[in-house]
Image: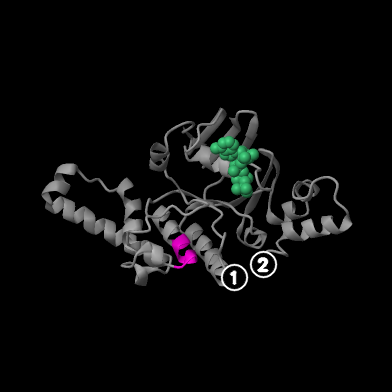
Amino acid sequence: MLDVEDLRLSFGGVHAVDGLTFQLGAGEIVSVIGPNGAGKTSVFNCVTGFYKPTSGRIRLNGTDVTGRRPSSITAQGIARTFQNLRLFGEMSVLDNVRAGTHLWLRQRVADALLHTPRYRRTEREATEESDKWLDFVKLRGDRGGLVRNLPYGEQRRVEIARALARRPELLLLDEPAAGLNHGEKAELLDLIRRIRDLGITIALIEHDMGLVMEVSDRVVVLNFGKEIADGTPDEVRGDPAVIEAYLGRDADEAEVEAAREEVSGARGE
Ligand SMILES: Nc1ncnc2c1ncn2[C@@H]1O[C@H](COP(=O)(O)OP(=O)(O)OP(=O)(O)O)[C@@H](O)[C@H]1O
């Protein structure tokens, strides 16, 4: 579904992404992990058109989308959430999710100005679809309240609902578990699996190794903008290159053991 080939992104002398090649197959849940600054968000930003790669190719279902604008890439079937939430705090929960529907809702300005039956029909459709996704993320009861009044974990679910309202084939989640408590993480795990069961492919950047190891079909590990491992959770958790990336070279025995635990998710909580 997604084919990234020899992707490079530089900021001056910093090679944030340095010749990265990887694929995502339809229906997979793939986690992208790596130490801070490894280039994970930069890859997401290139794939979604927020950054223009310095070189390389990004294909979605065979269509070359390299360097296209975010709106054009979203129209090709990719939606994302952000590391730092980007919701409209002063708008209702429902309206935030409805904002995701404009992509496929064919509305004309004249219809909106004149409140034609066609306009009212599309508005109803947007609300029904948004309510469906609010049900899906278990927030239907909060639809009328302002987003800023929701607890943080629920705001994260609103953002996921908004991304789903775009009807994506591929959903990119950037650190969805950040700031969540134990119960909220369990709920997120269930939500990610239910999204996949709808046939949506999921790529996530995540530092919570417990979640990564539990939910992923495959894990891609980056360090200094390059891929250093790509395999099942079991394969990457024992990979010496991965442990070293999380550690640096001059570690002693105790530090190696601690890094091994971190990568395996044993210290995820
Ligand atoms: N807009 C930018 N301008 C300059 N340098 C940048 C920019 N965005 C990222 N970088 C640099 O590119 C490298 C990769 O950053 P990136 O945010 O992609 O890493 P990351 O793996 O997502 O890190 P984290 O886990 O901390 O979010 C870092 O060295 C970072 O400082």
Q: Which percent across, then down, holds residue 32?
A: 62, 48
Q: Residue at x 30, y 48 (%)?
A: 102
Amino acid type, label 2:
Glu
Q: Residue furthest right?
A: 253
Q: Is residue 31 magenta?
A: no
Q: Residue at x 48, y 35 (%)?
A: 62
Q: Secondary structure at mark 2?
A: loop
Residue bounds of the magenta highlight: 151-157
Magenta portion: prevailing SS class? helix
Residue under numbered circle 1? 182
Q: 92 left or right of 3?
A: left
Q: Is mark 2 within 8 Å of ligand 1?
A: no
Looking at the image, residue 89 lies above or below residue 48: below
CA distance separating discs 2 and 1: 7 Å
Amino acid type, label 1:
His
Q: Which percent across, then down, holds residue 151?
A: 46, 68
Q: Which percent across, then down, holds residue 224?
A: 69, 39
Q: Quadrant of ligand 1?
A: top right
Task: Please state which of residues 200 and 84 is positioned toward the viewer in this rendering.
Answer: 84
Q: Secondary structure at mark 1?
A: helix
Quick check: marks 2 and 1 in contact, CB under 8 Å?
yes
Question: Which is nearer the N-term, disc 2 or disc 1?
Answer: 1
Q: Which percent across, then down, holds residue 41?
A: 57, 44
Q: Residue at x 44, y 62 (%)?
A: 155
Q: Is mark 1 within 8 Å of ligand 1?
A: no
- Mark 1 Cα shell of 10 Å, populated few (<14), some (14-19), many (≥20): few
Looking at the image, residue 202 lies above or below residue 62: below
- Give the label on residue 269, or none: 2
- Give the label on residue 107, or none: none
Task: Please state which of residues 166 and 24 is positioned toward the viewer in this rendering.
Answer: 166
Q: 257 left or right of 159?
A: right
Q: Residue at x 16, y 51 (%)?
A: 118
